[in-house]
Amino acid sequence: MVCISCKDTSTGLEKEFINGKREGYVDGIYVTELEMYYSNHKNFISRSLIFLKYSFEATKICIFGNYEIVFATSTPLTVSIPAIILRWLKGTTFIFEVRDLWPELPKAMGIVKNPIILRLLSILEKLSYKSADSIIGLAPGICKSIEKIISNKNKVYFIPNACDLDLFYPDKLASLKTNKHLTKYNKLIKKNDFIALFSGAHGIANGLGSIIDVASYLHDHNYKEIKILFVGDGSQKVYLQNLAKTKKLDNCIFLDPISKIELSLIMRECVHVGIMCLKNIPEFYNGTSPNKFFDYISAGLPVLINYPGWLTDIVINENLGLYSNPNDVKSFAHNIIKLYSDRQSLDKVSENCRSYAKQNFARELMIKKFLAMIKLTYLTNKSRENNYISRNFYIFFKRICDLILATLMIIIGLPIYILIALLVYIELGKPILFKQSRPGYKGKVFKIYKFSSMRNIYDKHGKPLPDKYRITKFGQWLRSYSIDEIPELINIIKGEMSFVGPRPLLKRYLKYYTVEENRRHNIKPGITGMAQVNGRNTINWDQKFKYDVFYVDNVSFLLDIKIIIKSFIKVLSREGINAKGEATMSEFKR
């Protein structure tokens, strides 16, 4: 793990910094802590410079280290730079966790306005998503935004924050809590006060000025036993403290950052409800996954939330708390009053929170999903580092050859292709070209083009009849000499296929592949391939997939030449056209 220093947290390393860093094992994890002191109190430029300096130092560590997986978690977006470099320089498996959308959120908040900086961040965002082998989005809106940018949606995973049920748990009914433990922090807190907690960053994004307004409403309406507890730090904390002081609000209590263990004790012993507050910015609605929500429901704290989105949907549908419209101070205050006044409802909602946390966000459930994603990603890309530079140089060279040769073949053979198209129209009718969705490189679906070789004949339910009833002698002749494959030259020019590679199979087969078999998509599909020159449709599916994966791991100029030569021989001898007992090839099932 490579991280920076922060005055409010500790990595667990205690020895002195040497040459700007200190290293060692913490709970079995080797930690490299860089001597860069970050704080939310720093201005935007200062923080940006720290982020860039971190990226530079982390890149050096990555390049000179030996790593099988690089895992980058944002924000900031610049954290992906070392991972991108390692991915393209060495072929290392790259997993990117997106905790907030950049540059969308800073732009929406007005933090970043410079069009050049926004453009550079957008480029980095797209490059990060393109480079990553798998992407974790912590919120549904994050995943949807990523899917709009990239073509391969299969590599996006929704894995939210987890509930630490062992650390945060209810010790007693919410209605029976007392504030004995809190009185040592502030004497304004009385034993029987009703505590509404906001924990976390006190930044611009949190819009905590509205909570000060809620406290003012409660104060003005003489709800003296309701106290709002702010725990944490941030750029707006001093402003909020001064605002509460100016309004003479004795119901606002501010605590400095405390450890999670201490926070969990306060939640367990003293807090009655948890506050979720953000500025009214639409990009926040489905694009954030605050830790505090998961801590609250783990501890059995009803949630008071003031912005719509996926978390509010959960709160409302599962009866985990109450929602008020953004900036509706009176509604938010009345929601606090409602739970303060009805302790029986408070206890019921508290039970719902803990139960929902166990069933849906337990750390064990999230870890299982997380580890499965890491394992799948690594096994899919584990061989990429082998001969990475020479392999990529050849693939680049191969693409140029594909493009030149396919273009020449279309130009030179155009009269012949028009004649074939005319024959297809006479013998089989429309459509002349058969088009079908097939998964290609990295599972990205594309439209494959072929000359039609079967009649469109359907049963009474509108389903196509089996191949043996639809294929004609003319269609069989097209297939026997692979003439039906000629339009795939269009796919090659478009960059969707190559002359040599694993054949693109049906999209419905994707769900049947093992992790190893799915690696056949780690290279562009081809018109011909290893399986086609080693039995074609006469070998079973397991043998075909082994040939495909072998090709992915051993692609080279000599291997491609060998496959092309053998393909000509197989086509001229018309070998392996049909599987035994089939008109074409057997259906793949598991």
Image (tube, grey):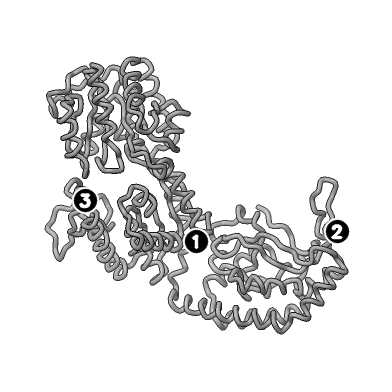
Mark 1 residue crowding within 10 angstroms, few (<14) / some (14–19) / many (20+): many
Asked if residue 269 shows in the view, the reply is no
Residues under numbered marks 3 and 1 in contact, where contact means CB atoms less than 8 Å apart: no
Residue 285 on image: x %, y %:
42, 40
* Badge 1 amino acid: Thr
- Residue at image position (77%, 70%) is 577
Give the secondary structure at mark 3: loop
Q: Earlier in the sequence, mark 2 or mark 3?
A: 3
Numbered label attached to residue 469: 2
Gap in angstroms between the C-alphas marked 2 and 3: 69 Å
Which badge, 2 or 1, is on the more N-terminal residue? 1
Rendered view: 494 above or below 268 = below
At horizontal 71% and vertical 62% (from top left) the residue drawn is 435
| Badge number at residue 380 | 1
Q: Indicate the position of residue 557 as horizontal and vertical percent values.
A: 55, 82
Query: Between 323 and 364, which is closer to the camera in this rendering?
Result: 323
Task: Give left or right: position of 392 versus 568.
Answer: left
Res 281 → quadrant: top left
- Does residue 17 appear in this view? yes
Q: Nearer the viewer, mark 2 or mark 1?
A: 2
Say if 128 sits above or below 486 in the image.
above
Q: Which residue is mark 3?
A: 11
For the point 36% across and 68% down, the residue is 85
Residue kind at label 3, given as amino acid type: Thr
The span from disc 2 to disc 1 (Cα, nearest Å) is 39 Å
Using the numbered discs, state the Cα–Cα distance from disc 3 to disc 1 in whole angstroms. Answer: 32 Å
